[in-house]
Amino acid sequence: MRTLTSLWIGLGLAAGASAAGAQPATVVRCGRLIDGRADEASAAVDVQVAGGRIAAVRKGVAAPPGARVIDLAGATCLPGFMDLHAHILINPGDVLADSMRKSSARKALEGLRNAQVRLQNGFTTLRDPGDEDLYYSPIEVRDAIARGDFEGPRLFVAPHMISSTGGHGDFNDLAADLALQVPNVVVDGPDAMRKAVREEIKHGADWIKLAATGGVMSAADDPRAQSFTDEEFRAAVDEAHRQGRKVTVHAIGAGGLKAALRAGVDGIEHGALIDDEAIAMMKERNVPLVPTIYVLDYIIEEGERRGIPADRIAKAKSLQAERDRCLRAAFASGVTIAFGSDTIFPHETANREFARMVRLGLSPMAAIRTATINAARVLGIDKDLGTVEAGKRADIVAVPGDPLADVTALESVSFVMKDGRVVKPGADSRR
Ligand SMILES: [Zn+2]
């Protein structure tokens, strides 16, 4: 029901909002502002918005005549959140057969709905790091939102997670005598890797995603084992960089993670078993880590109830304690951390990642930065987004109370503005 409601809100707003430019000036009166830059929150700050951008941020902004005033006196305003690991096509409880039964068109519709759910929960920007569609529905969702056809978060897309035969993105629990086109990209050898990267870019990829090691939610692969040869990694990075795209990799074990780093990849997803040498390499090369903590906990906490196969739950359990130690070390090291959820769970619960980061050692302010300025830098959009500052695009969210005192406040987003348009009105909004 919640999902449906969000969809209708999103669609309803899209009709009026797509006539861009004709927005009245708006003043958002924030009880507290975390601007994404300062180390402290500031009290009672007004944000003036005009033409989709932030015109002024200071105490006591006078509302221009005819301006809309949004009173968020009891709330904390923050920059719009960004999630760098949002699988918009995946629905909780989906099993292999679901993915094989749905056409690309249906996946696009579900992806749009899920993206809109994320927007209603404060995420104005998402990166989809590979999704389960042989075709390119996340690209279509990205472009439909960018055109203004539908309300939704801005999207950056790696269409597929490119995998080796039997690797994390191969559907490796099927019978050997079942010849089947899996809804994913599976390649072996540097030439095939180059072709796959070229195909991704041809069809609109913003990012390239590889499975550098085995994973948890797949059957026949070992999360600790390296999936591609050094030569295959180098081919992918060379091809992507030559065409101006960045590469990020799914990596659990430290061996495959470091092989990918040596080949020159630009980002690490999960990093569950990261070691000190890998951390040092990432700091030296300024490669960000997207840790995706909640997803592993979810598989353990709710997997049985949600129909996740027992062997996947066992894999998750075998990693959790070591994962906690490794990520604590990474967080303490000062390596750049950017927010990622890995939504194989209900999309409206992705905000739980903030509290899981705090549990493993980040301060609430540092956790907020992972989803704002840090993520904006990884995406290369920090000139325009990631902080609440004059001149930037007006992506502003609000939560009740003080998230620095109780980080779970970030799970209850009450107000969302994207590009200066209110897409979720706070309870106190008035004209
Ligand atoms: Zn993922």
Image (cartoon, helix red, strand yellow):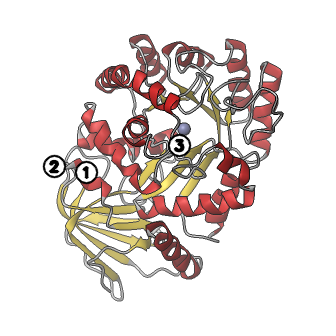
286 horizontally vs 11: left or right? left
Asked if labels 2 and 1 touch by Cβ distance under 8 angstroms, the answer is no
Q: Amino acid at mark 1?
A: Thr
Q: Residue at x 53, y 80 (%)?
A: 12
What secondary structure is marked by label 3?
A: loop
Residue in front for this viewpoint, 412 or 177: 177
With respect to residue 232, does 157 lie above or below?
A: below
What secondary structure is marked by label 2?
A: loop
Q: Amino acid at mark 2?
A: Ala
Marked residue nearer the N-terminal end (2 or 3): 3
x and y, in percent, of residue 47 in the image: 31, 67
**Does residue 146 appear in this view?**
no
Residue in front for this viewpoint, 226 or 34: 226
Q: CA distance from mark 1 to mark 2?
A: 9 Å
Q: CA distance from mark 3 to mark 1?
A: 28 Å
Residue assigned mark 2 = 405
Asked if labels 1 and 3 touch by Cβ distance under 8 angstroms, the answer is no
**Does residue 426 appear in this view?**
yes
Residue assigned mark 3 = 380
Residue in front for this viewpoint, 74 or 178: 178
Marked residue nearer the N-terminal end (3 or 1): 3
Disc marking residue 408 = 1
